[in-house]
Amino acid sequence: MTHDSPSLHSRHRAVLPSWLCLYYERPLEITHGEGRYVWDAEGNRYLDFFGGILTTMTAHALPEVTKAISDQAGRMIHTSTLYLSRPMVDLAERIAALSGIPDARVFFTTSGTEANDAALLLATTHRRSNQILAMRNSYHGRSFSSIGVTGNTSWSPTSLSPLQTLYVHGGVRSRGPYAHLGDGEYIAACVADLEDMLEQTAGGVAALIAEPIQGVGGFTAPPDGLYAAFREVLARHGILWISDEVQTGWGRTGDHFWGWQAHADNGPPDLLTFAKGIGNGMSIGGVVARAEVMDSLSANSISTFGGSPVTMAAGLANLNYLLEHDLQGNARRVGGLLIERLRAITARLDVVREVRGRGLMIGIEMVRPGTDERSPEAAILAMEAARERGLLIGKGGRGGASLRIAPPMSLNVAEAEEGADLLAEALQEAQVKSAAS
């Protein structure tokens, strides 16, 4: 069977929305994958350093997951939450125990967007308020409510919202009015900003929603402890804390299983949202919350596709594999080596402003050579050059000027070295072309 990607691209444009993003000047059709590699319709092999936007968490075509899917599909594909589901209860028990939230309850959705949407519903219902605190440069999904708490203009197609959102400083350490401060002073300034913001509200703010590391924002992060300091202020006002772990969960940061654990001095969040990696490509999202918060809804509710038997079986097999093979530890070890290698590679490239991140969640901010001005053009040049060399990476950040590196967490040292070499060549090409333009 032959594949004609240019023809497929024309068909895509004819029937799908113009705003549906496609990477690359010549869009790529990925046909299959194995481990950390994927192949396109023309037979080219690529080292995958983006994992379907941090979703292929363990590996492509992981036998344990594909077998769990096949076995469950052979028995029952769908029932809905109107009936008892053993796979759903099994996975909920594991996630509740791992969450760190006491007396936890779990509600499954089919995406991170839905998970954040549900968390906002729970928080605003529990607090009887539609006021939400969110972080500048944040991203929380594509639904009407989650767009309304996304502090990133590139992903905010409307200013309309069912929520009143107030944006707080702190998610971007190396830019903004507090960038020049030391970590302790930075946290103190952000806390003062939060307290000032609360004095300007009508009272009764429902929740703060925050990504421990901002994903679409370009893998930016505050100093460890910022959200613990925020939590102290929030607790005085009865305001809930929602930790958006859609991209930071399951040990990807290496140092912690959840991103919130870098900010744990004042306890766990009230609500935690998850998605992406747990399904390894299957559509799983969800919310973990204290029973008091989760059970605050007075109306009946169901989830037609959330918690489906097939996705739950996949998620459980994937989680077991991750824990049994200590992929969190692997992310810490291999990710640490990769970050240091990338910092060494970019030290003499003035098209790169910063290499940041932790574990296997690494961002590279691109600028116009010799300036501090973000350069989406340089990011695109680097992505195209990497693709031509057989490496797939993502991008994000303000204006799309940051490269995002998030390979499957089973990445080994040899593959990390291979990817670093390919990326070094791509960045050098971006440097030359950016300087010439």
Image (cartoon, rainbow, N blue to C red):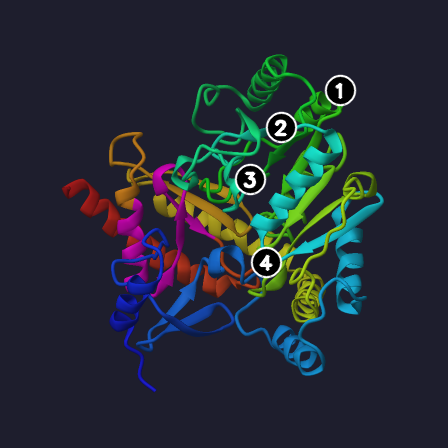
Work out whether residue 213 can be spotted: yes
In magenta, the rendered stretch is: 379-405
Q: Amino acid at mark 4?
A: Gly
Q: Relative to residue 20, is residue 299 drawn left or right?
A: right
Q: Which mark is residue 277?
A: 4
Report the residue marked by disc 2: 226
Looking at marks 4 and 1 on the same chain, the residue that comes earlier in the sequence is marked by 1
> What x and y, as percent, mark residue 190?
57, 20
Residue 166: x percent and y percent?
A: 55, 24
Nearer-the-camera pick, 119 or 169: 119
Looking at the rendered image, the disc whose residue lies closer to the viewer, 2 or 4, is 4
Taking the spot 55% from the left edge, 21% from the top edge, the residue there is 186
Residue 425 appears in view: no
Alpha-carbon span between mark 2 and mark 4: 25 Å
* Secondary structure category for the residue under label 3: helix
Give neighbour class at mark 4: few <14, some 14-19, many 20+ (Cα, 10 Å). many
Under tag 4, what secondary structure? Answer: helix
Residue 370 vertical position relative to residue 295 in the rendered view, above or below? above
* CA–CA distance in space, label 4 to label 1: 34 Å
Figure label count: 4
Question: Disc 2 residue type?
Answer: Leu
Question: Which of pointers 1 and 3 indicates the residue nearer the eye?
Answer: 3
Q: Are marks 4 and 1 in contact (CB under 8 Å)?
A: no
- The label nearer to you, 4 versus 1, is 1
Q: In the rendered structure, which amino acid carries the disc numbered 3?
A: Ser
Measured as percent of width and height from the top left, residue 56 is found at 54, 63
Return the residue at label 1: 236
* 106 is higher (above) or lower (below) than 172: below
Which badge, 2 or 4, is on the more N-terminal residue? 2
Name the residue: 66% across, 63% down.
322
